[in-house]
Amino acid sequence: MEKKPSDAAIRAWTRLTRAEQSAMGLIEQLLKAAKLPPLVWYDVLLEVERAGAAGLRPFELEDAMLLAQYNLSRLLSRIEEAGYIERQHCEDDGRGQIITITDAGKAMRRKIWAVYSTAIEAAVGQHLSDEQANTLSELLERIAVRRPKERSPR
């Protein structure tokens, strides 16, 4: 017989879900008001910028962001069309691609961060002391276990 969640665990789950929806809603609302792309674009641009000149393979980005390949492919096309990333052929794999960030992509990531960081402060920072935020972060880390996805050979 499987163990059922306690009332406390259910309450924590509900509040965690509501807090996430509230915070993400605020962030997306502020980005839209500033006429900026959605937050997922920031995540892509940040991961690709962190990779440096070597860039990232799409599957590496997929793993880092925990997105399904078909969602990532469409997202990358939109970001590329906006001029924020470039795709180049991978010399090691004739069918593969390397994604790199453009100067315009770096500038856009900084613009999004200006709004995003303000939203983080509004959603979390103004409600918690640094000590409380650290405690919350530690508690969330306990349940935010990332399990590597099973990869088929490519």
Image (cartoon, helix red, strand yellow):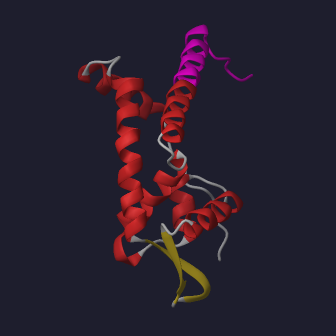
Membership of 3 in magenta stretch: yes
Between 22 and 9, which is closer to the camera in this rendering?
Answer: 22
Residue 27 picture location, percent across and down: 49, 35
Q: Residue at x 52, y 73 (%)?
A: 57
Between 34 and 105, which is closer to the camera in this rendering?
Answer: 34
Tally of numbered discs? 0
Q: Residue at x 62, y 63 (%)?
A: 78
Q: Is residue 116 above or below residue 90?
A: above
Q: Is residue 133 above or below residue 102?
A: above
Between 124 and 9, which is closer to the camera in this rendering?
Answer: 124
Looking at the figure, which quarter contains the C terminus? bottom right
The magenta region covers: 1-19
Direction from residue 115 to residue 12 in the image, left or right: right
Q: Residue furthest top?
A: 7
Membership of 2 in magenta stretch: yes
Direction from residue 23 to residue 110 in the image, left or right: left
Direction from residue 42 to residue 94 in the image, left or right: right
Residue 106 picture location, percent across and down: 37, 62
Residue 71 picture location, percent across and down: 68, 57
Splitting the image into 4 quarters, where does residue 116 fall?
Answer: top left
The dominant secondary structure in magenta is helix
Looking at the figure, which quarter contains the N terminus? top right
Q: Residue at x 38, y 50 (%)?
A: 111
Q: Residue at x 49, y 40 (%)?
A: 31
Splitting the image into 4 quarters, where does residue 142 fall?
Answer: top left
Residue 85 picture location, percent across and down: 49, 70
